[in-house]
Image (cartoon, rainbow, N blue to C red):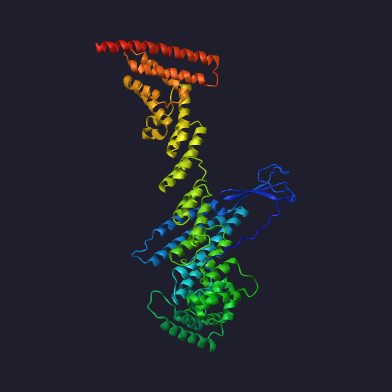
Amino acid sequence: MEELDVEPAETLIPGMGQLDRPIGFAWGPGDLLLYDTQYHDSDPPIKAGSRDGGFEPCCFMYIVRHDEDLYSPVLRKLYNESHGIFVGLQKIDEESSKSRKTQFIGVSKNYRSVLQACIHEMHQLTVSTRDVAESNKYSFQVSILSAMELTWNLCEILFIEAASAGPLLILLLDWVRLHVCEVDSLAQEVLESQTPTQHDRFWDAITGCVLQGRMDEARQLLSKETSSNVNSRSMCRVLDDLLKKMPMLSSSTAQTLTEFELKWQHWREECTHHLMCGTFSSSQDMESICKILLGDEETLLERRELMTTWYHYLVSHLLFTHPTVKPTELHSYAQSSLNIFLSGESTAEPLDNILLAAFELDIHQVIKEFSIVSSNWWFVAHLTDLLDHCQLFQSHSLYFGSNMREFLLLEYASGLFSHHSLWQLGVSYFDYCPEQGRAYLELHIERIPLTTEKKALKVLQICEKRQMTEQVRSICKTLAMKALRNGRLGSALSWSIRAKDAAFATLISDRFLNDYCERGKFSDLDLLDNLGPTMLLSDRLTFLGKYREFHRMYNEQQFTEAAGLLLSLLTANIAPSFFRLTLLLDALPLLEQNEVIFSSKQTYALMKCLEDRMTVKQELTQEPTSQELNMENTKVEMLRLALARNLARAIVKEAMLKA
């Protein structure tokens, strides 16, 4: 089944606000910012944010969220709990010894149990909240969640369990009993009254139980009438016997459909006999129940207030007219029940259309209808994923590449990424979208606001686990820049190394060296002392690491090794030009030692480095101030004097060693 590529209809927005002006907008990751403008219809369109064309800033701004449900604490529990179920479903082994169908039914029930828990919690909030607006919002959410659970349960029966004739009606009865609870409260109210048989709705309670196939509970209520009213005792016993004898299919028995139909036909003949003989003629309520047992349509419609919904009427009607209905026959009965129940007094609701599509066994239409009316993608994404595992979507692909399952999961996960914490759940959904999941994850993960370092580390862990090299580099560069702006050089260098960004590592290394020139000491010594092989990322970082190693050698009085390292740093030409004089001045303490550290050859090399430094300085276009010039000349003279003295001492020492 291929979807047609149809262009969406163009919708004109004339304006909003008190002046009915055109609106400006800006897209966000999960919402839309709308604002009033001062344009007139005759004004030419210009880019948002421009002040041309008579635009004036306005105080009215509106944030329109596509998925408001993400910010509900109760629904966040739904998203978190269902995430674990979803991941578990993806890991079900195709060759598992346990029946896959049984596993899928268990997964479906788990999803529904999470939905039911959220409905219960949301209902409690509805009752306990005093604010009318908030209470109405919670009540609306209860109705939406209830519709989800109702539809999911029906899809579970029709598509996952794929019940055949016989067991199908048993499951539909359980479905109705679970979702139409008025009978339970009515029966409880009657039983808790002082004299149940005198209660105004005593017979309504019995009839309600009969309509849901709860014959044992109906007989329990009927026994109250038997014991309290002598005149109707014989009729009650006959009716009780009919209720007791009514054949009911059970999945636990090995009864064939033919055997059941024979028993059911015999039981119907007995009900017809009692009705025709006038057994219940003196009790209108009992006669009405007997007619219901025979599936009399007129009587069923008279009791429609006890069923409240057309699908309850459908199941009750099938229970007493066609208990062995086949799945393929459901749609005609469902459409007829809806038409009869509404009787032209009202139009079908969106939920009615969804349930009709399910009874028609058109799962694609169910997904489509629910996508239109739902405020988020949770329901359609998870149901489609489960049904896809049941191999019900194998032939359905979309015109833009991915199949329906993947498309809905991508949309749902994209919505999760607009939330400050639920984005972590979205990662798993992208992981299980084989065609476009990786591309979506790469695009969304770069847009996560890295508000804290803890959050950044989470994002990095996700990227590194999936070998998303470019995203790792981009995130690390962003964090490095942020740390550099905040003056945290150590953190900035650490992130740049993690990003493997040689240019940025060079920039930060220069900042470290500038900081050393100003303060006379290094910050973040732990980082510099443990650079290891990472210092090879750039020449400047290598210089920084080796220069710190020179200081460590000097402090440990390893003067000969320190002198050799210092000379190699000078002659390798990897030091920045602004730092070469500082590097030469570091030789002064070694030149002034009692013991000769630098040989004559090394001293000549130092002299050459000094003269090279002075030549470069003369070529600089920016002239230093007189104070800076005097200070530098003093340092250079001191260095030349020290070099001359050391050269003399080195020559004498070397001559003595030769002698």
Residue 525 seen anywhere in this rendered image of the structure:
no
Where in the figure is residue 618, as x and y percent of width and height? 50, 18
Query: In the rendered view of the protein, which quadrant contains the C terminus?
Result: top left
Quadrant of the rendered image containing residue 607: top left
Left or right of residue 38, residue 69 in this image: left
In the picture shown, does residue 352 fall above or below 52? below
Residue 350 seen anywhere in this rendered image of the structure:
yes
Q: Nearer the viewer, residue 60 or 610?
A: 610
In the picture shown, does residue 632 fall above or below 127? above
Where in the figure is residue 109, as x and y percent of width and height? 44, 63
How many numbered marks appear? 0
Q: Nearer the viewer, residue 225 or 6?
A: 6
Q: Nearer the viewer, residue 184 or 363?
A: 363
Quadrant of the rendered image containing residue 641: top left
Where in the figure is residue 216, as x and y percent of width and height? 46, 75
Where in the figure is residue 67, as x and y percent of width and height? 56, 54
Q: Nearer the viewer, residue 30 or 139?
A: 30
In the picture shown, does residue 502 fall above or below 608? below
Residue at the extreme left: 659
Left or right of residue 525, residue 359 in this image: right
